[in-house]
Image (spheres, coloured by chain):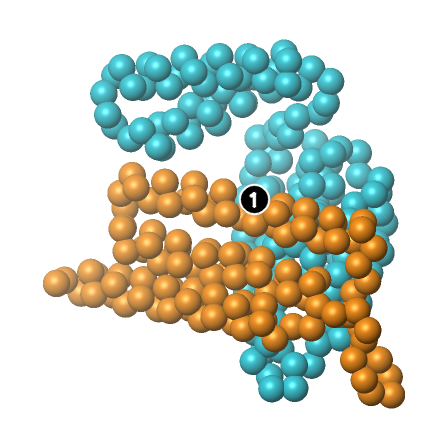
Chain colours: A orange, B cyan
Amino acid sequence: MSIVGTVRYAAAAVLMCVGAFFFFVGTLGLIRFPDFYSRTHGATKCDTVGAGSILLGLCVLRGLEADVLKILAIAAMVLLTSPTAGHALARAAYRTGLRPWTHRIGGGESDDA
Amino acid sequence: MKALQAGLWLAAFWLVLAGASGVATAVVGLAGAAGLAAWAAYSLWAEDDPPVLSARQWIRFAGYCVGLVRDIVAAAILVAEKVLDPRMPIDPVLVVHRARFGREVSKIALANSITLTPGTLTVDVDGDEFVIHCLAEEFSSEIRDGTFERRIRRVFEER
């Protein structure tokens, strides 16, 4: 393998690992966060950074080929639909009166879980 | 103008998906794009303002995207720190921000950019009032001082 190919492989691997890391963090946030709204943060942010850098890694791996345009189209699709879906969920919850979790001074959990 | 821009986008999208697979495929795709664009311009967008951008606005939009990616990465690292911290130091706040825009597409762009940026989530948009859920108060500074809004205004509102 040529030097350029090796560097490209390495860059793609790094980008995909970064993506996997952010997916991991997002999932961990989904589990650890206290209420619906903050969990939505965890779920939607995986898509932005995680999917974004994995797709970018695939682009780098593919090099200068027509397929890269397809990957970019997928990325644009994800970046448009993921916040829309997250917003629709949060808006539905907000309009039905779900109150966000806040710190309660003096200890104890907030009553709406 | 709006039919032309929509048609060009649809044709480009078709060519990206179909690749170089013969003249017949390309002709069918281009005809479909022209038909869809005409339908959209005369029926779908008969009353509303479609998100058509001028050439200069497209250039500014590209610049805006680069800036947004930089902000998203910076915010993602901050959120990751909070998630991985055993004490999980989050302090969610709801921020109500008013932003007056002339076009519907600016509102969509602002709400979408806020939701894309880690740590902030647009919960509701009512008229020109944006309700934003922030994981901690520090994430809301760019929204509250209007930096975000000014950038959107420069891209979509100035001719």
Q: Residue at x 31, y 29 (%)?
A: B18
| Image-based side of B139 in relation to A11, left or right | right
Which residue occupies 77% across, 57% down?
B132
Give percent across and percent down for residue B131.
Answer: 80, 54
Residue closer to the observer: A96 or A26:
A96
- Which residue carries the number 1 mark? A80
Quadrant in the rendering for residue B72: bottom right
- List x then y, in percent, for residue B145: 81, 60
* Residue that sits furthest to the left in the current view: A1
User: Residue at the location (24% across, 25% down)?
Assistant: B21
Looking at the image, which is closer to me, B52 or B43?
A: B43
B122 relative to A65, above or below: below
Tally of numbered tags = 1
Q: Quadrant of the C terminus of chain B?
A: top right
Left or right of B103, for residue B116: left
Other residues around mark 1 within 10 Å, as few (<14) / some (14–19) / many (≥20): some
Q: Is residue A86 left or right of residue A7?
A: right
Give x and y (percent) for residue B73. 55, 64
Position in image of residue A45 (x %, y %): 57, 61
Read off the chain for label 1.
Answer: A
Quadrant of the snapshot with the N terminus of chain B: top right
- Residue B84, by quadrant, is bottom right
Location of residue A112 with respect to A76 vertically, above or below: below
Instruction: Please state which amino acid type lies under the numbered disc 1.
Output: Leu
- Residue B133 at least partly seen: yes
Residue B154 seen: no
Residue ID at (52%, 61%): A46
Foreground residue among B23 and A36: A36
Query: Circle 1 sits in a helix, a strand or a loop, which is it?
Result: helix
